[in-house]
Amino acid sequence: MQEQPSHSPPKLALRLFSWFCNPAYHTDIEGDLMEHFEDNVEEEGLKKARILFFLDVLLLFRPGIIRPLLSRTPFKHPTMIQHHLKISWRQLIKNRGYSFLNISGLAMGMAVVVLISLWVWDELSYNKNHENYDRIARVMINQTIDGDIQTSWSAPKQFAPALREGYESNFKYISTTSHFTGRALIVGDKTIGRSGMFVEADMPEMLSLNMLSGTRKGLDDPYAILISKSTAKALFAEENPINQTIKLTTDDLLKVIGVYADMPDNSSFSRAHFFGSWKLFEQWQPEWVGWGNRWFRAYVQLADNVDLEKTSATIKDVTLNNLSEQEGARLNPEIFLHPMSKWHLKSDFENGMVVGGRIKFVWLYGTIGFFVLILACINFINLSTARAEKRAKEIGVRKALGSLRTQLISQFFSEALLVTGIAFVLSVLLVALLMPFFNEVSGKEISNWWSNPVFWLFGVGFTILTGIFASTYPALYLSSFRPVKVLKGSIQSGRRASIPRKFMVTLQFTVSITLIIGTMVVYQQIQFAKGLPLGYDQSNLLSTYISDKITEKYPVFREELLQTDVVEEVGKSETFITQTYINNSGFDWEGKDPGLTEQFFTMRMSHEFGKTIGWEIVQGRDFSKEFASDSTGFVINEAAVDYLGFDDPIGKQIKWGENGYYHIIGVVKNMITQSPYRPTPQMIYFLDYDRSDVVTLKLKSDADVATALPKIEAIFKKFDPVRPFNFQFMDESYLTKFRGEERIGKLAGFFTILALLISCLGLLGMIAFVAERRTKEIGIRKVLGASVFGLWQLLTKEFIVLVLIAGMIAIPLSYNYMSKWLENYEYHVSLSASVFIWALGGAILITLLTVSLHAVRAALANPVKSLRTDS
Amino acid sequence: MKYRIGEFEEIVLLTVGILEDEAYGVNIKNDIKTRLDRKVSVGALQAALRRMEKKGYLTSQQGDSTSKRGGRPKLFFRLTALGHSALAYSRETRNRLWDAMPPPAFPQLKLS
C-alpha cells in the first residue's frame, strides 16, 4: 500500500528521538523529520542529509518536546500514589513490629552513612577556604641519612631570597615563616597567650586572608601585626583594634594594621591567631644562622600557568648548591614542593615519595559506612521477602483484578520509599543527637551541617537510592507471583526461597564479626603500647617553658621552688621529656664506620633534670656538680651504646664537630621520649644551662595538686610577671601520643556496635518470621512430646550455623587486614587466637540471646491455641 | 486581555495563517525559508507550535500521510480566533509605538 522510501534516515537518531520525545507528538514530528530528510537527500545528497537529520534530532532535544520526566511513573495519576501511600501506611501500622525493626535498622545505617559522609566531606574540603588552594605549596626537603631518604618540612632563612633571585618568574608569592609559636600578647594590663606565625609580607596575600578591617598589606614593617577577630575581641573587646599597640614579652611594640576572620578548623592555618612580621622575627635570630640551620618554614604560591612538578624539579638543588660539606652537603639535600591539596591527606613520606597519609582513613571509614548501609538494606530485603507469603494473597487479588506487574512494582517502590523516608528523618535526628559525641571522638568541629543545602540534596538523593536499592529485589520477587497459584494457596517458599535470606544473614555477620575483631585488636594494641615500660617516672611531673628572665636567675629560682613544701626536684631541659625531637650530627668516635652518616637525638639539660624525671642510670653515674669536667660529659642511652658499638662505654671520648671532645660518664636506661611504637633511638644528654628553656618540676608525692599549683605560680610570677603560667602534666602529654589510635579505636567501636545492632534487629525479624511460619509444626511437635529445649534447639540451630559460617569467612579476612595494620607499628601485639575466639563466641552469644527472645516464646506457646486456629 | 507572543512565535503564527489548510511542519518551515530567507530548525519550530497550541492560538488536526513521511500522518495547524486576535494585538501595539516615535534625530538625514 505504501511504497518504502528509497533511503532511510539513521536508525540510531530515530531511536534516540522516540526515546526522548513526548509520545503525544512523536508520530507527526517523526513524519516531518522524514519528509524533511527526503527533501534534503534530493537537494544535498544522502550523506549530508543524514548528518542534518542527526542535527535536527539533537535540536529537538528541548523542553516542550522532551517527554515529561514522570510520564511513565504513577505520578501521572495522583490517586494511584495516594492509594499506594495509604496501603503502605496501613501495612506499616498493621505490622508494627516489623516496621519498627525495618525503620530503626535503616535509620541507624543511614545515620552512620551521614556521619561518615560529613566526616569525609570535612576531610576532603581541608584548606579549600584558601582562594589560591591549587597554587600554594610548602617547601620540603629530602635528605639521605644512613642510606634511606628522610623527608622533613623545614627551610633555612636564606631559602626565600635565593628563590626570589634565581627563579622569580615561577612564583607569585614567596615567604619564609616561623613555625607556629605561642606568644603572650600584652595590651595594658591584659595578657593573653595566642599561637601565631611570623611571616613575610607575601604570606597574607597567599593565604587570601579575609580582612574584616584594616589591610593585609604592610608586614614589611617589622613592627606591624595582623590579628584574628577572636584575638582582637579578647584584647580590645569592642574597641577598634586598628592602630592599637600590642606588646610582646620581648618588649617589642607592635601596631595592629588589620583584623582578619578566624580561619576554619579544617585549615592548616586555623591555629594562626596572629601574623607578625618576619623581619622582627629575623632580628631575634643569631647572626650566624646559615643554610645548614633549617629552623624555619617556607611557603610559595606558583605563578599562573606554571607547573608544580617542573618547578619542583628546577629548584631541587638550591640548598645543595649553597651548602658546605661541613653543613651537610653529604646528605644530598633535595628540595621539593608539596602542594596544599596534599598537605592534609597525603603527607606520609617514604624514601622521599608520598605514600599516603590520612587518605587511608577516608577510605577505611568510607568502606565501613558502605558496609553498614548494606547491612541495613539487607534487613529490609530479608524482612520484605520473608513476609512474602503473608502478602501473596494481596498480590494475587491485585493481579486477578488486572494490575500490571509494573504497577505492583511501583507499589512496592513507594512502600520502600516511605520506609526509607521515615528512616532518613529519624537518622537526621539521630545524627543531630550523636554529633557532639562524634565530634569529640573524631576530633572534629562539624556544625551547621543541617543548614547546607548540599547536605539535603545529597540526603534526599541518597534516601531515594537506598530505597530503590533495598526494594528492587523484594519488588521483583513479590510481583512475580502467579495469581492462580497464590490464590489457590499453594505457594510454598521451600528451602530454595530461604537461601538468599540465609546468604544475606551470613554476610551481615561476616561484616559484624570482622568489625568486632578489628576493634578488639586496635584496643589491644593501644593497651599494649600504654603498658610499655617508660624508663622514667611520669607521676606528678609537670613542665613549662620559661623566658630569659627566669633563665638568668635560674639557681635562685630553683632554690625558691624547692623551699615551697610541695616541690621535690626541679630540672631544666631543652624540650619536654615527651618530645625529644632535636637531632644533631657531626659526631666522631673511635671505631666509627667511615661511611656512616650518623645522627643522634640530643637533649641539653641541667644537672638535676635526670633526677627530676627519675631516670635509671645503668652504668657509670649521673651528672654531678662535684665534677667540673662534667661540662664536657655525655650521658647516653642504651640505644646509643649499641649505635656507637662500644662494649664498655664509660670514659670513652666522642668528638662533636667544632665543639670539641666529650667523654661518656654514664649510660641511662632507654626511655620512651618519642613514639611508643618504635624502638627508642640513640640519644645523648649533656649539660647546657643557656639553651634549655623548659623547666620540669617533680611535685612531692603527698602534695595536693590544687594547693601546690598556686604556690608554684606565685614564684613564676615573681620572676617573670608577664608570661602566663602554662604548664603541662607529663603523663597527660604522654597520653596524647595515643590519641590517633584511640580515635580509630573509638570510631571503630562505635561503628561495630551499630553494625551489630542492625544485624541483631534483622535477626530478630527473621526468627519472628520463622517461628510464626512454623507455629503449627511446633504445636504438633509439642503434642507429640517434644521438649521446650528441643524446640528451642530446632529454631536456633539454623542461625547458629549461619553465624559459624560467617565466622569462618570473617576470621581469615580480619586476620589478613589486621596483621597488615599492625605492621605499621614496630612495637605491636601479636595477633592471638583468643581475639578470634572471643569475637566469634561473642557473636554466637549475641545471636543466641536475640534468637532466644522469640524462640523460647514460640516453644512455650500452648499447642492448643496454635493448632485450633484454622487457615 | 494581554497577549504575549515573541518575535519567532509571531512569524510562525503568521505563516500558519498564510498557509491556511496546508500548514503542517515541513510546509511551515519551507514557507518561512522562502518568504523570509530564514532557516528554522525542526526543533525550534515544533517547540513553538506546541507551545502555541497549548496557549490556544492554534489547533491541530491529523491529516493524510505520504510515502515520503514513512507512513506518518501530517499534523495540520490552524489559527484560532484567539490566535488571530493575538496577532492583531501585536500588530496594533507595534503600530502605536511606531506612531509615537519621533522622527529620527540623525542630522545628516533630512526629512521633509
Image (cartoon, rainbow, N blue to C red):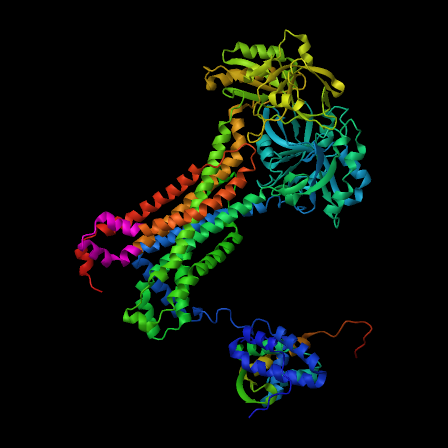
Residue A425: in sight, yes or no? no
Answer with the quarter of the image where residue A752 lies. Answer: top left
- Which quarter of the picture shows residue A143? top right
Name, please, the residue furthest toward the top.
A626
Magenta-colored segment: predominant secondary structure: helix
Q: Is residue B78 above or below residue A467?
A: below
Q: Residue at x 31, y 67 (%)?
A: A491
Q: What percent of the width, then of the height, locates residue A545?
A: 60, 22
The answer to whether residue A764 is above or below residue A569 is: below
The image shows residue A352 at horizontal and vertical percentages of: 68, 39
Task: Find residue A262 and report its horizontal and vertical position in percent.
Answer: 60, 39
Q: How many numbered marks appear?
A: 0
Indicate whether residue A420 is drawn in magenta. Answer: no
* In front of the other: A865 or B33: A865
Q: Is residue A397 above or below residue A855?
A: below
Taking the spot 30% from the left edge, 63% from the top edge, the residue there is: A390
Q: Is residue A180 left or right of residue A771?
A: right
Query: Which quadrant: the N terminus of chain A?
Result: bottom right
**Which quadrant does the C terminus of chain A fall into?**
bottom left
Query: Closest to the observer: A599 or A49?
Result: A599
Let me know if residue B50 appears in the view: yes
Q: Which span of residues is magenta-colored? A: A770-796
Question: In x, y percent, where is residue A220?
Answer: 74, 34
Residue A393 vs residue A841, the one in the foreground: A841
> Per the image, is A779 magenta?
yes
A130 displayed left or right of A72 = right
